[in-house]
Image (cartoon, rainbow, N blue to C red):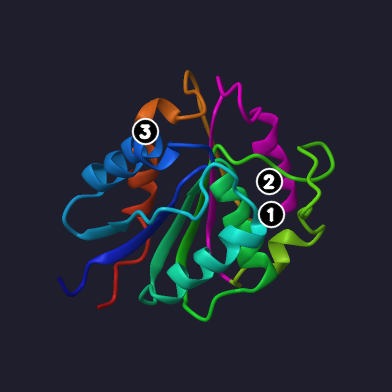
């Protein structure tokens, strides 16, 4: 349907996460956004072993297939790889927003990685003028809530949304995310 804003939802990592865990998040977002949005939820390759080397090319292909004015959303390690992919090689598509959900921060103060570390100038490397929203549950025992603060420092223009009582799966409720997305500039078909 013409005029529907596309939303790309990148799953988190782990065996069975696409079907058993993050599907509930993508369905919550689809339900909360309604008919004016098309939520795409691709399965990432080798989901049980998420790496930048395997997921980044898949994310680039998915972003390249979007319309201008689309939104990209990533959950958990999917968000970490998504934001690093966008910083490493900004897309040719104009994005309306970047949304990180319960994203582990890779670098000083966060998680170590042999593959990559967030660049010191992460915010400057992201597509210019694109709003970034970081949502994190305050009861997250997988990616500590302090990781959201690390993203806020690395991306000074990011808006941080702390969700009391929410865990790593954010209670399978993305109503707050949908509310933010519906406030973006209207979709241009």
Q: Residue 100: x percent and y percent? A: 53, 47
Left or right of 135? Residue 40 is left
Dot 2: within a 10 Å radius of its alpha carbon, few (fewer than 14), some, or many (20 or more) residues?
A: many
Using the image, tell me which numbered label, if any, was put on residue 151: 2
Q: Residue 64: x percent and y percent? A: 45, 76
Left or right of 42? Residue 140 is right
Q: Which quadrant of the figure has residue 171?
A: top left
- Magenta stretch? 129-155
Q: Label 2: state its secondary structure.
A: helix
**Looking at the image, is 153 positioned above or below residue 116?**
above
* Residue 132 part of the magenta segment: yes
Q: Label 3: state its secondary structure.
A: helix
How much space separates mark 2 and mark 1, taking CA atoms? Answer: 6 Å
Using the image, tell me which numbered label, if any, was put on residue 155: 1
Left or right of 186? Residue 43 is right
Q: Which numbered mark, 3 or 2, is in the foreground of this view?
A: 3
Q: Which numbered mark, 3 or 1, is in the foreground of this view?
A: 3
Closest to the observer: 63 or 177? Answer: 63
Q: Is residue 132 visible?
A: yes
Closest to the observer: 37 or 9? Answer: 9
Using the image, tell me which numbered label, if any, was put on residue 44: none
How much space separates mark 3 and mark 1, taking CA atoms? Answer: 31 Å
Q: Is residue 159 visible?
A: no
Q: Residue 116: x percent and y percent? A: 77, 55
How much space separates mark 3 and mark 2, taking CA atoms? Answer: 27 Å
Q: Earlier in the sequence, mark 3 or mark 1?
A: 3
**Looking at the image, is 125 positioned above or below residue 184?**
below
The answer to the question of whether label 3 and label 2 lie on touching residues, with beta carbons closer than 8 A, is: no
Closest to the observer: 12 or 16? Answer: 16
Q: Residue 45: x percent and y percent? A: 50, 55
Q: Which residue was labeled with disc 3?
A: 20
């Amino acid at each position: 349907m013409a005029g529907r804003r596309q939303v790309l939802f990148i799953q988190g990592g782990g065996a069975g996460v696409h079907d058993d865990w993050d599907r509930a998040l993508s369905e919550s977002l689809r339900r909360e956004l309604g008919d004016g949005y098309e939520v795409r939820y691709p399965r990432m390759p080798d989901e049980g072993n998420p790496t930048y080397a395997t997921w980044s090319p898949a994310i680039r292909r998915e972003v390249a297939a979007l319309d201008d004015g689309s939104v990209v959303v990533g959950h958990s390690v999917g968000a970490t790889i998504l934001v690093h992919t966008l910083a490493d090689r900004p897309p040719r598509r104009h994005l309306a927003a970047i949304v990180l959900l319960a994203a582990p921060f890779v670098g000083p103060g966060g998680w170590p990685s042999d593959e990559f570390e967030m660049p010191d100038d992460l915010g400057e490397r992201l597509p210019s003028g694109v709003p970034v929203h970081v949502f994190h549950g305050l009861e997250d025992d997988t990616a500590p809530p302090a990781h959201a603060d690390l993203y806020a420092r690395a991306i000074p223009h990011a808006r941080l949304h702390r969700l009391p009582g929410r865990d790593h799966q954010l209670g399978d409720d993305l109503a707050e995310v949908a509310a933010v997305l519906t406030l973006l500039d209207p979709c241009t078909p």
